[in-house]
Image (cartoon, helix red, strand yellow):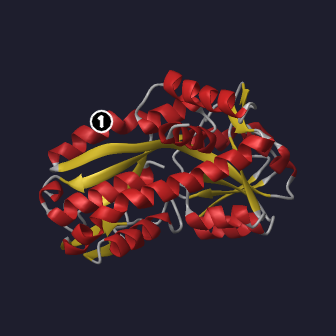
Amino acid sequence: MRIEHLEYLVEAARCRSMRQAAHNLFCTQPAISGAISSIEKELGFPVLERTPSGVIPTSKGGMIIDDAAQILRLVHGWTLMHTEKENRDVAGEIYAADSGEFGLTFFQDVAMRINEKYPRIVMHLVDPGNILQRINTGAFQIAVLPILPIHFDAMKSYMKRYHWEMEPLYDASYTLLVNTKHPLAKRFEVTVQDLKRENIRVQASFPYRDSLEAIESSSDIRFENSIKILSAVSENLAVGIFPDSHDAMVEEFEKAGLIKSVPFLGGIFPMRYCLLYWERLPFLEAGIAVIREMRDAYRF
């Protein structure tokens, strides 16, 4: 059983989609499907259940996937051993933009991991407010920006004019956060119409407000910050529409059994996470290291 196949399996299970896993890992969907079939043939039982809306782990598959993820973490640790001394010698100061709009802690956690791996790189996190409005002020050199996928090409050209590079990290979508006791927690997927007569909490920056007009008269829709949304959902006071940003705090609430993330049918609220960095950053030793670590962290 190849390590590469385990990577394909873990990513497909995380995304609930072989197509999305192939996109994230820069390979083809048949490669993902073939690797998983090879694993299942070797084990003698299915690890993923194929459904019209994607893939979900089987009961045995869930245990296999957890073990595979642990193996991959160990292997990744082995490959880092020979670079530890080199990492300690890389020094510099990097200013990174964290608007706080699309996650609670993930960006900060990434910065902390970079500091642990490169003790002489100092990561300064700044809150620029609107990242695009302050892109040319010198307040920061690198940022992660979620945008609508249809805007990517135009946005990339716009950023180039200001001497900034822009590259996609991964595609995700907004999902529904519900309390585990909420009736919708039993669903594999939901639609906007399922939210009629619900108390709904949505981020102020939510770009798909027009899609909520159909239920606006029957639902209590309020636009809040991330922490207030998570608090309301965990107390079962509301449901929340929240980006699938792999935020550590959200994941901890899920592990504790307080909330559940339920995808919308057809991924109707897509979002693309992009890495922005000043075009001269890759010419700095610290810049090269930070860009590489940010890519790795967000390409789950």
- Give the residue displayed 69% in from the left and 49% down from the top: 176
- Give the residue displayed 55% in from the left and 29% down from the top: 35
From the viewer's side, name the closer residue of 96 and 131. 96
From the viewer's side, name the closer residue of 110 and 259. 110
**Residue 205 shows in this picture:** no
- Give the residue displayed 40% in from the left and 70% down from the top: 113
Amino acid carrying mark 1 in the image: Ala
Image position of 249 (left or right of 163): right
Image position of 16 (left or right of 289): right
**Residue 60 shows in this picture:** yes
Image position of 278 (left or right of 297): left
- Residue 205 in the image: x percent, y percent? 50, 55
User: In the picture, which quadrant includes the N terminus?
Assistant: top right
- Residue 217 in the image: x percent, y percent? 76, 46
Q: Residue 42, located in which quarter of the rendered image?
A: top right
Q: Residues within 10 Å of mark 1 (few under 14, many from 20)?
A: few
Q: Residue 255, located in which quarter of the rendered image?
A: bottom right
Q: Is residue 32 above or below residue 73?
A: above
Residue identifier under label 1: 154
